[in-house]
């Protein structure tokens, strides 16, 4: 017996029984409505000789409608589901008994309603419901036999045939309902396994650090995981279902792992490593394409920095020894020329030649000094400074430089705390400002240099120098910081190389952007003090 006021069943079983009760109640109401309509039609036509009387049938229909209303209220409350199921089985048997009794007992054509009641019982409560309905049916049929008159009383053979049909219906209905129940349980178990596998798959796809993109056979995007959204800079909702987004062209068909350059939605150029492979089903029919990719930009920058550091270290050791050996004979040569020039009896032409020798020797000494400065940079002497103040001091000196006097300088200097060597930062800013001014001078027109600085959200200090000069050819952009590489007629090729060495010594980053005819921009990022301390 169910506990009063509490649901008998919970979960999927209770929900399944509730659905079946709802459909059975609806079917019963439809049946009774048709029966009521047919009765009214037959009575109206005056052909009621098959009925004992229309009034009992109307009463039966009213009872069924009232009972269905009670069952509907119980279904709405979600309580007493199993008790309601037994009650509905009893109601079906009772309705069948009443209809058979009112339509001629043994001669009634509605004896099949008992079998329907048994089938309903097996549907509701499986084998137990079929057995309960069979017991109630046999009992009700046994009650009808004495009530029938001599003319309407069934024969022994008819009683045996009817009871055998009832038993066979109960056996078959119970067996099929039990098979259906077991099949449903297995299906629910498989659905649970599938749901667990699907949840695991979704968790893996969401959690993996690599970007994953899948497309169908027509090239429409079907999946974009969170890592792919972050790398590409687009939410999945904007690209799902789209055919061949522009960034998808980056992933060209290949036989293995490949790399390419991708411009994401934010306009940032990324170095992408990817693997592209077809998606096929069990019979090797192609369903679409999948791409797994990673952002290798930072990794490639680190590799380039390591390679550049190794090259510069080897070059620095060679250059330091060579420069040292050059300075000694150069000093002797300059001293000797000074002595000769100071002696009497030199002609004006000879004096002019000595002056040229000394000037060029001085220029060579300056070049050697800069080379030594590049080859053996002093380690940073870090101080807590405001980067904007260092840049303002550098700008004041730059304004008196011949190159600085020919350009318009725009300053956007926000406070930017930094831990760095002030002198080396001045050297970086000076080299970048002079390079920008000299680049503008090459086009022979007035130009603008923009100097800006500020702080990043992670605490890093950054400043940039931009110009509107001729720009840098793409093939030269990657070689700018290589020692002795220069695009200027009188350049040494050591300015930007020295800037790169100082930035690397500060564990910072130097970014360069340029388009021919649109100027160039150099951005220096100096990491926050705590990041330097943590290595």
Image (spheres, grey):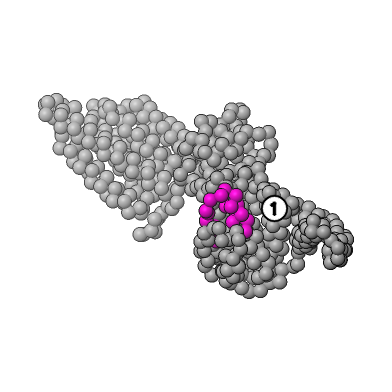
- Nearest the viewer among 4 and 514 is 514
Where disc 1 sits, the SS reads: loop
Residue at image x 56%, y 49%? 444
Quarter of the rendering containing residue 29: top left
- Nearest the viewer among 516 and 317 is 516
Residue 483, image x, y percentages: 74, 53
Residue at image x 31%, y 30%? 111
Look at the picture and state if 456 lies above or below 291: below
Residue 515, image x, y percentages: 57, 46
Residue extending farthest to the bottom is 384
Residue 402, image x, y percentages: 60, 61
Which image quadrant: the C terminus? bottom right
Horizontal relation, residue 275 to residue 61: left or right = right
Q: What residue did someone put label 1 on?
A: 491
Q: Is residue 199 magenta?
A: no
- Nearest the viewer among 72 and 205 is 205
Residue 334, image x, y percentages: 84, 63
């Amino acid at each position: 017996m169910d506990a009063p006021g509490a649901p008998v069943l919970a979960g999927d079983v209770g929900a399944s029984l509730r659905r079946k009760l709802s459909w059975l109640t609806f079917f019963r109401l439809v049946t009774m409505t048709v029966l009521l309509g047919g009765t009214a039609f037959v009575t109206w036509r005056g052909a009621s000789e098959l009925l004992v009387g229309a009034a009992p049938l109307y009463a039966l229909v009213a009872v069924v409608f009232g009972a269905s209303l009670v069952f509907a209220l119980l279904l709405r409350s979600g309580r007493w589901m199993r008790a309601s199921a037994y009650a509905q089985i009893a109601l079906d048997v009772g309705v069948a008994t009443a209809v058979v009794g009112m339509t001629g007992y043994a001669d009634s054509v509605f004896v099949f309603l008992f079998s329907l009641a048994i089938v309903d019982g097996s549907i509701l409560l499986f084998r137990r419901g079929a057995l309960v309905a069979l017991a109630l049916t046999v009992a009700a049929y046994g009650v009808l036999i004495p009530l029938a008159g001599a003319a309407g009383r069934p024969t022994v053979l008819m009683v045996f045939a009817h009871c055998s049909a009832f038993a066979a219906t109960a056996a078959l209905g119970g067996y099929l309902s039990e098979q259906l129940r077991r099949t449903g349980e297995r299906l629910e178990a498989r659905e649970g396994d599938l749901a667990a596998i699907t949840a695991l798959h979704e968790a893996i796809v969401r959690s993996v650090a690599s970007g994953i993109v899948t497309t169908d056979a027509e090239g429409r995007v079907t999946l974009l995981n969170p890592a792919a959204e972050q790398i590409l800079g687009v939410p999945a909702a904007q690209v799902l279902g789209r055919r061949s987004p522009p960034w998808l062209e980056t992933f060209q068909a290949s036989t293995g792992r490949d790399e390419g350059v991708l411009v994401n939605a934010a306009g940032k150029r990324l170095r992408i490593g990817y693997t592209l492979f077809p998606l096929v089903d069990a019979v090797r029919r192609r369903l679409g394409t999948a791409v797994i990719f990673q952002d290798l930009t930072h990794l490639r920058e680190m590799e380039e920095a390591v390679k550049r550091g190794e090259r510069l270290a080897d070059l620095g050791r060679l250059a330091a020894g060579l420069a040292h050996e050059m300075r000694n004979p150069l000093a002797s040569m300059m001293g000797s020329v000074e002595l000769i020039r100071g002696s009497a009896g030199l002609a004006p032409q000879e004096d002019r030649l000595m002056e040229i020798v000394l000037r060029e020797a001085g220029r060579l000494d300056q070049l050697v000094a800069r080379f030594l400065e590049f080859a053996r940079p002093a380690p940073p002497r870090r101080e807590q400074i405001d980067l904007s103040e260092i840049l303002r001091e550098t700008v004041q000196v730059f304004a008196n430089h011949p190159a600085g006097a020919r350009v318009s300088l725009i300053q956007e200097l926000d406070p930017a705390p930094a831990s760095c060597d002030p002198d080396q930062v001045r050297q970086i800013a000076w080299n970048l400002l002079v390079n920008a001014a000299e680049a503008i001078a090459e086009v022979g027109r007035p130009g603008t240099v923009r100097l800006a600085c500020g702080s990043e959200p992670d605490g890093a200090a950054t400043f940039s120098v931009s110009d509107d000069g001729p720009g840098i050819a793409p093939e030269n952009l990657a070689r700018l910081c290589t020692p002795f590489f220069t695009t200027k007629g009188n350049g040494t090729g050591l300015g930007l190389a020295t800037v790169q060495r100082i930035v690397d010594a500060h564990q910072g980053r130097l970014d360069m952007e340029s388009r021919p005819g649109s100027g160039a921009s150099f951005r220096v990022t100096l990491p926050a003090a705590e990041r330097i301390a943590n290595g």
